[in-house]
Amino acid sequence: MSISLKRLIGRTEAGDAVAVLIFAVLVVIGIMLIADGLRLKVHERDGFVSPAHMLVDVRLRPHG
């Protein structure tokens, strides 16, 4: 049983506004992730990696 997003928020002006707001939030999150990835590449090229990125790198690196 699947519930579509349109049925969940309704086909009203308020529902359309909610759908646009959700889409805008997802776009902003995507842009932030892309910008963060580009910033990490620039820092790696310059030889500087922030402590947060080092922590993520250590967690993602396979052990052993």
Image (cartoon, grey):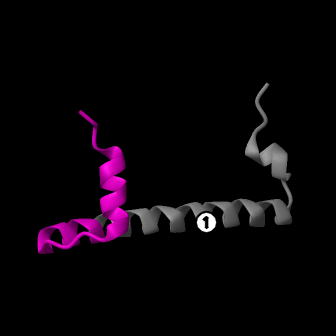
- The one nearer the camera, 18 or 33, is 33
Left-right relation of 63 to 19? left
Residue 55 at x, y = what percent? 35, 58
Where on the picture, by quarter, is residue 14?
bottom right
Residue at the location (18% across, 67% down)? 44
Tell me if residue 19 is in the magenta stretch. no
Residue at the location (57% across, 60% down)? 26
Residue 49 at x, y = what percent? 24, 69
Query: Callout 1 environment at 10 Å: few (<14), some (14 to 19), or many (20+)?
Result: few
Residue 2 at x, y = what percent? 76, 30
Q: Residue furthest top?
A: 1
Instruction: Give the residue type that dot 1 points to.
Output: Val
Residue at the location (45% across, 68% down)? 32
Left-right relation of 53 to 1? left
- The one nearer the camera, 13 or 36, is 36
The residue that mark 1 highlights is: 25
Q: Which quarter of the figure is the N terminus placed in?
A: top right
Q: Which quarter of the figure is the C terminus placed in?
A: top left
* Dominant SS in magenta: helix
Vertical placement of residue 18 versus 43, above or below? above
Residue 20 at x, y = what percent? 68, 64
Find numbered disc 1 in the image and state the secondary structure of the residue it sits on. helix
Q: How many marks?
A: 1
> Which residues make up the magenta segment?
39-64
Left-right relation of 44 to 51? left
Tell me if residue 56 is in the magenta stretch. yes
- The one nearer the camera, 5 or 37, is 37
Residue at the location (52% across, 64% down)? 29
Vertical placement of residue 62 versus 42, above or below? above
